[in-house]
Amino acid sequence: MTTHRPDPPAPRAAATGPTVAIDIGGTKIAGALVGPGGTMTATVRRPTPRTTDAEGVMAAVAEVVAVLAADPAWPSAVRCGIGSAGPVDTARGTVSPVNIGAWRRFPVRDRVAAELARHGATLPTVLVGDGVAMTAAEHWLGAARGHANALCLVVSTGVGGGLVLDNRLHTGPTGNAGHIGHISVDFDGEPCACGGHGCVESLASGTAIARWALAHGWTPADDPTAAGVAASARTGDPVALAAFDRAGRALAAAVAATATLVETDIAVIGGGVAAAGETLFGPVRAHLGRYAALSFVQGLRVVPAALGTDAGLIGAAASAAVLLPGG
């Protein structure tokens, strides 16, 4: 049964100063000060180091914190939210991102808190997965607003996700609930970086789309990434179209399985690959009917995220406001 409420609860706003928000992904590390209404200031972005050790990656995070600390609003910050590529362990405050090989069980929550303190801000700090952060943002201010039960996906370098159930952000004991990218949708599929086989991420991430297209004869005009594949698909290139159809089918199968399990009525897809628009959403919707066949999921909708690249930072802040005691 579809449940839709027009006014879902916003993150608590007892403390009215800004939240320090950090968004850590496989390609970029971003930061901002996010006000109680979701307005961002002092935004900063740095590339995620690819050929370095754990401390090299942390140095990029520290640089982002230093830029934020120079903003006049920094002294009034009340909390910090970190959204990171996963898997995460929110209880321990550690991350082991599939797409950041230098970090394994890295204590990012404590290290960020130490950086905050070094710049004069001793703040309560929470860690969530990037999919959970995006979900918090889209439920608060975006495409999932008003939906009591929603699945949100980040399709980018990897594939992550998060859940809202009964109007509450559902993170699970370690913070990985909704991590849809590592559901297996192809039992005989290729090995995934996580150790599994046939995972959604190994078929539908931007990296996977470009890799499959190149392996099947696609010749990029100038951009060898998923964005380049999308551009070719829009001109009718058959290999590019097949690459996105393959990705869309994988996403449709996983979305339908999740909806069948927990009765979500909307799936919101964001991240860099979602910028392909109908090149991605068309195949997802076309395949969805094959998998969402039971009566209680036949009304499932798949829609684009509304907050774009801001979702990770807004969601990190929203998660902190929801999850921290007294937030």
Image (cartoon, rainbow, N blue to C red):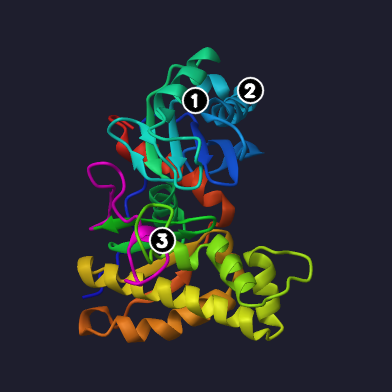
Predominant SS along the magenta part:
loop
Question: For the residue marked with disc 3, what is the amino acid?
Answer: Pro
| 107 lies above or below 215 | above
Q: Which residue is mark 1?
A: 77
Q: Position of residue 43 (x, y in %)?
A: 63, 38
Q: Mark 1 to mark 2: distance in Å?
A: 10 Å
Residue 158 located within the stretch drawn in magenta = no
Residue 127: quarter of image: top left
Question: For the residue marked with disc 2, what is the amino acid?
Answer: Pro
Q: Which residue is mark 3?
A: 191
Q: Is residue 224 left or right of residue 105?
A: right
Mark 1 and mark 2 lie on one chain; the one further toward the N terminus is 2
Q: Mark 1 to mark 3: distance in Å?
A: 43 Å
Numbered tag placed on residue 226 in the rendering = none
Question: For the residue marked with disc 1, what is the amino acid?
Answer: Ala
Secondary-structure class at tag 1: loop
Q: Quadrant of the N terminus?
A: bottom left
Q: Which residue is mark 2?
A: 72
Q: Which residues are magenta?
A: 166-191
Visible residue check, residue 12: no
Circle 2 packing at 10 Å, graded few (<14), some (14-19), many (20+), is few
Q: Nearer the viewer, mark 3 or mark 2?
A: 3
Secondary-structure class at tag 2: loop
Visible residue check, residue 274: yes
